């Protein structure tokens, strides 16, 4: 694509839409001192037009290795009198899919201009715009329901928020309060101090245990350090801990079906470390030594239901008479989100799962979609969605793991709407009404 273009991409006009897309691209100056030549400037607003697909372009360019800034023209320091910008502004219309991808030119060199300056030496800006154009078009978005925050995550976040509001002392949180980058970043910005272990917490401070639960040894350590503990362990994880204590008290050897290294598994094993063995697969079960006496098993709450069932079946085959939990350890939120995404994946060309890579239940949603034969991707937010995946994807399923905020899903839907007309349809498999109370001293949930 040429250096300075304000271009109608009418060939990509979405069926049913009268608005031809608008691409504004070229080399400009920026008044910002921290903008360097070659920086890509992506506008999030252009005149009265909101460029809601800007995060898609920003992500695409960052993955290509470009330094990118996103914001309004004022925030980017780009004068509206720049020729390419002025021409674009004359063509801008609300409702028109719009991409404004500018490149800071040589005037941003302290040493002055350079006539041979090439703003797109690797072609990444041109490729990103072409990918944006290819992704334009009408589509259907299937929203899996339930999705996003569960009762345990809501409670854990609220505990930290209430402690932060109460102040004034620092609020320490052992481990990520829930496995989501945005949640942790937002709480850290409000003053929460995330630590890996209690030896990082000053004596007598306030500390919150994460939703995944902790081993009794951690509780004892906190007591020795004189810490003021607030426990955000999900009550459904606490239920599994109680099962382990009960099975251990009757002398069983215990198998935990779970994932090695996951904080929930570590906390659960910590209830009876001398008699609990982690098994992840049916092959692990086959490799177990024979055991003496009674045996029981429990499960990590966020497993794939099919995966857990197959390992439980292998345990029953291997150790006839083994006893499992009275009711399924896999929690309602995990089960509902997996059932909903299965329905969505059966109809979709692509399933986007919002969540972090260390979120077990989010990763399981990707696996469940792939098991339906549907391409699926785990994304932290809209910026993680590769434009190339959207081209030709007429039906896109969207869901979110239990630790990912609903607003991130909204952002994805709005971003897709900026690429053409979108018909949204909710695919509901259950209605969740579960809520959990707060620890004493923090009041009742606010809703
Ligand atoms: S996913 Fe399930 S176990 Fe985990 S916090 Fe949510 S409700 Fe609790």
Image (spheres, rainbow, N blue to C red):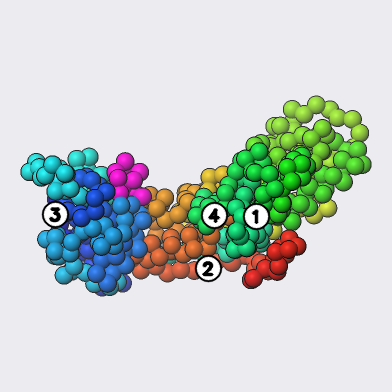
Disc 1 residue crowd, few under 14, some 14–19, many 20+, Cα 10 Å: many
x%, y% of residue 66? 29, 43
Give the side of residue 60 with respect to residue 245, left or right. left
Q: Which residues are magenta?
A: 59-68
Q: Nearer the viewer, mark 4 or mark 1?
A: 4
Q: CA distance from mark 2 to mark 1?
A: 18 Å
**Mark 1 CB in 8 Å range of ligand 1?**
yes
Q: CA distance from mark 4 to mark 3?
A: 44 Å
Q: Quadrant of the C terminus?
A: bottom right
Q: CA distance from mark 2 to mark 4?
A: 36 Å
Task: Please report whichever mark, 4 or 3, sits nearer to the chain's N-terminal start.
Answer: 3
Mark 3 residue element: loop
Residue where numbered disc 3 is placed:
4
| Residue 334 circle label | 1
Task: Please report whichever mark, 2 or 1, sits nearer to the chain's N-terminal start.
Answer: 1
Residue where numbered disc 4 is placed:
191
Q: Residue at x 14, y 60 (%)?
A: 82
Task: Please report whichever mark, 1 or 3, sits nearer to the chain's N-terminal start.
Answer: 3
């Amino acid at each position: 694509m040429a250096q300075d273009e304000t271009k109608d991409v009418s060939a990509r006009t979405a069926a049913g839409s009268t608005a031809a897309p608008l691409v504004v691209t070229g080399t400009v100056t920026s008044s910002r001192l921290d903008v360097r030549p070659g920086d890509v400037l992506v506008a999030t607003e252009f005149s009265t037009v909101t460029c809601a697909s800007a995060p898609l372009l920003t992500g695409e360019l960052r993955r290509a290795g470009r330094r990118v800034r996103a914001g309004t023209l004022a925030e980017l320091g780009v004068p509206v009198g720049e020729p390419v910008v002025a021409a674009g502004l004359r063509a801008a219309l609300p409702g028109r899919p719009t991409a404004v991808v500018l490149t800071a030119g040589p005037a941003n060199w302290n040493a002055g201009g350079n006539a041979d300056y090439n703003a797109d030496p690797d072609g990444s800006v041109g490729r990103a715009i072409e990918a944006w154009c290819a992704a334009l078009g009408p589509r259907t978005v299937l929203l899996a329901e339930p999705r996003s925050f569960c009762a345990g995550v809501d409670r854990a976040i609220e505990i930290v928020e209430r402690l932060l509001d109460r102040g004034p002392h620092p609020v320490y949180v052992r481990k990520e309060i829930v496995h989501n980058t945005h949640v942790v970043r937002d709480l850290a910005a409000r003053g929460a101090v995330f630590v890996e272990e209690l030896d990082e917490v000053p004596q007598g401070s306030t500390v919150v245990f994460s939703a995944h639960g902790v081993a009794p040894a951690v509780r004892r350590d906190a007591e020795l350090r004189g810490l003021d503990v607030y426990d955000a362990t999900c009550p459904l994880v606490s239920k599994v801990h109680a099962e382990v204590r009960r099975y251990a008290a009757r002398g069983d050897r215990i198998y935990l079906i779970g994932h090695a290294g996951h904080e929930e598994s570590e906390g659960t094993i910590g209830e009876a470390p001398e008699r609990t063995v982690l098994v992840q697969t049916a092959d692990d079960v086959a490799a177990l030594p024979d055991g003496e006496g009674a045996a029981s098993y429990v499960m990590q709450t966020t497993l794939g239901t099919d995966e857990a069932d197959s390992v439980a079946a292998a345990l029953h085959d291997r150790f006839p008479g083994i006893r499992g939990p009275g009711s399924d350890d896999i929690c309602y939120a995990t089960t509902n989100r997996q059932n909903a995404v299965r329905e969505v994946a059966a109809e979709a060309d692509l399933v986007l799962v919002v969540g972090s890579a260390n979120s077990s239940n989010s990763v399981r949603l990707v696996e469940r979609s792939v098991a339906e034969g549907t391409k699926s991707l785990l994304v932290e937010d809209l910026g993680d969605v590769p434009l190339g995946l959207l081209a030709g994807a007429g039906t896109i399923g969207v869901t979110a793991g239990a630790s990912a905020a609903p607003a991130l899903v909204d952002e994805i839907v709005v971003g897709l709407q900026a690429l053409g007309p979108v018909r949204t349809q909710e695919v509901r498999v259950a209605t969740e009404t579960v809520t959990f109370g707060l620890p004493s001293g923090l009041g009742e949930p606010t809703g």
